[in-house]
Image (tube, grey):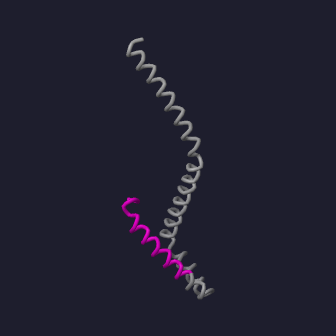
Amino acid sequence: MSALNERAIQRGRLLERISQQRVALGTCCAPLADALNTADQVVAGAERTRQWISENPLAVGLGLFILVVWRPKGMLKLARNGLIGWRSLRFVRQKLGALLA
């Protein structure tokens, strides 16, 4: 058998092995794909919410005013938790900024 035929046979075997590995990788990574799709939906929902808030500041302000009048202690807790969350987000972005950019 010539060297060219041996190379062609070897190439065919490699292509078949690659094909099998792709199928196996797709099968084992299906749960990861589901998790990433869920994360994409959460990010898209957060972006839609941010956009709605920026388009409707009067409604948001009115809602906050009603909450302050109705539950002042609850609003203080909400403001404290929001501040803690905001600081945490800034800290994570600062530490992981190079990875997220």
Main secondary structure of the magenta stretch? helix
Residue in the foreground of this view, choosing between 19 and 67: 19
Q: Which residue ends up furthest to the right in the rendered image?
A: 70
Q: Is residue 88 above or below residue 28?
A: below
Indicate yes or no whether the magenta region holds residue 63: no
**Count of all numbered marks drawn on residues in the image:** 0
The quadrant in which residue 24 appears is: top right
Q: Which residue ends up furthest to the front in the rendered image?
A: 1
Measuring 60% from the left and 84% from the top, which residue is drawn there?
A: 74
Residue in the foreground of this view, choosing between 73 and 89: 89
Give the x, y percent position of residue 88.
47, 73
Q: Is residue 60 above or below residue 7?
A: below
Measuring 50% from the left and 74% from the top, which residue is drawn there?
A: 85
Q: Quadrant of the N terminus?
A: top left
Give the x, y percent position of residue 3.
38, 16
Q: Which residue ends up furthest to the top in the rendered image?
A: 1
Q: Is residue 64 above or below residue 2?
A: below
Indicate yes or no whether the magenta region holds residue 80: yes
Tell me which segment is drawn in magenta. Answer: 78-101
Give the x, y percent position of residue 26.
55, 41
Does 66 sit left or right of 88 as displayed?
right
Give the x, y percent position of residue 11.
44, 24
Q: Quadrant of the C terminus?
A: bottom left
Measuring 52% from the left and 32% from the top, which residue is drawn there?
A: 19
Measuring 44% from the left and 23% from the top, which residue is drawn there?
A: 10
Q: Is residue 71 above or below residue 29?
A: below
Residue in the foreground of this view, choosing between 49 and 89: 89
